[in-house]
Image (cartoon, grey):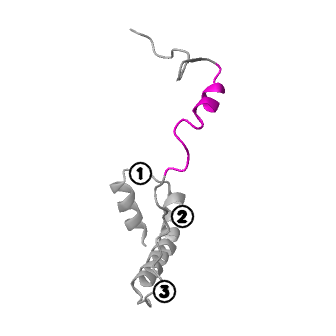
C-alpha cells in the first residue's frame, strides 16, 4: 500500500498517525492483505466430503439426581440462612 492509502484510511478512521506509524502500517498492511488472500484461497479450495458415521455427540437430557438431593448440603454451607433462602447483606438502598 502507498502512503496516501494509509493516510486516507487513517482519515476515515479518524486517527492521527505520526510519520513513523504511517510507515509501519504501510509495511504491515501488505503482509496482512497477503495473509487474507491466502486464507481466502484456502476457504475457496475444493474439499473432499467427509465420509463416516454421523454421530450426535449430545446426550439425552435426563435428570440424574433426585429432587432436593443436594439442597440441604448447599444450604448448610451458607453462613446465614432463613429456611431455604440465603440471608445476605443488603447492597442496594431503599431510596
Mark 2 vs mark 3, foreground winner is: 3
* Mark 1, other Cα within 10 Å: few <14 / some 14–19 / many ≥20: few
* Magenta stretch bounds: 63-79
Residue 24 shows which numbered tag?
2
* Mark 2, other Cα within 10 Å: few <14 / some 14–19 / many ≥20: few
Residue 87 image offset from top left, x and y in percent: 55, 17
**Measured Cα–Cα span from mark 2 to mark 3:** 49 Å
Q: Nearer the viewer, residue 89 or 65?
A: 65
The kind of secondary structure element at disc 3 is loop
**Measured Cα–Cα span from mark 2 to mark 1:** 14 Å
Q: First in sequence: mark 2 or mark 3?
A: 2
Residue 52 shows which numbered tag?
3
* Location of residue 5 by image quarter: bottom left
* Mark 3, other Cα within 10 Å: few <14 / some 14–19 / many ≥20: few
Counting every numbered tag in the picture gives 3
The kind of secondary structure element at disc 1 is loop
Q: Are marks 1 and 3 in contact (CB under 8 Å)?
A: no
Task: Residue at 41% x, 90% y: name it.
Answer: 46
- Per the image, the residue denoted by label 1 is 15
Task: Residue at 46% x, 60% y: name it.
Answer: 60
Which residue is outermost to the top?
95
Mark 1 vs mark 3, foreground winner is: 3
Which residue is outermost to the left?
12
Which residue is outermost to the front?
66
Q: First in sequence: mark 1 or mark 3?
A: 1
Amino acid at each position: 500500500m502507498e502512503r496516501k492509502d494509509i493516510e486516507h484510511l487513517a482519515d476515515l478512521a479518524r486517527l492521527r498517525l505520526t510519520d513513523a506509524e504511517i510507515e509501519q502500517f504501510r509495511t504491515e498492511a501488505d503482509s496482512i492483505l497477503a495473509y487474507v488472500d491466502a486464507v481466502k484461497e484456502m476457504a475457496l479450495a475444493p474439499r473432499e466430503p467427509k465420509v463416516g458415521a454421523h454421530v450426535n455427540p449430545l446426550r439425552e437430557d435426563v435428570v440424574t439426581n433426585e429432587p432436593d438431593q443436594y439442597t440441604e448440603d448447599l444450604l448448610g454451607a451458607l453462613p446465614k440462612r432463613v429456611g431455604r433462602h440465603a440471608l445476605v447483606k443488603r447492597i442496594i438502598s431503599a431510596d
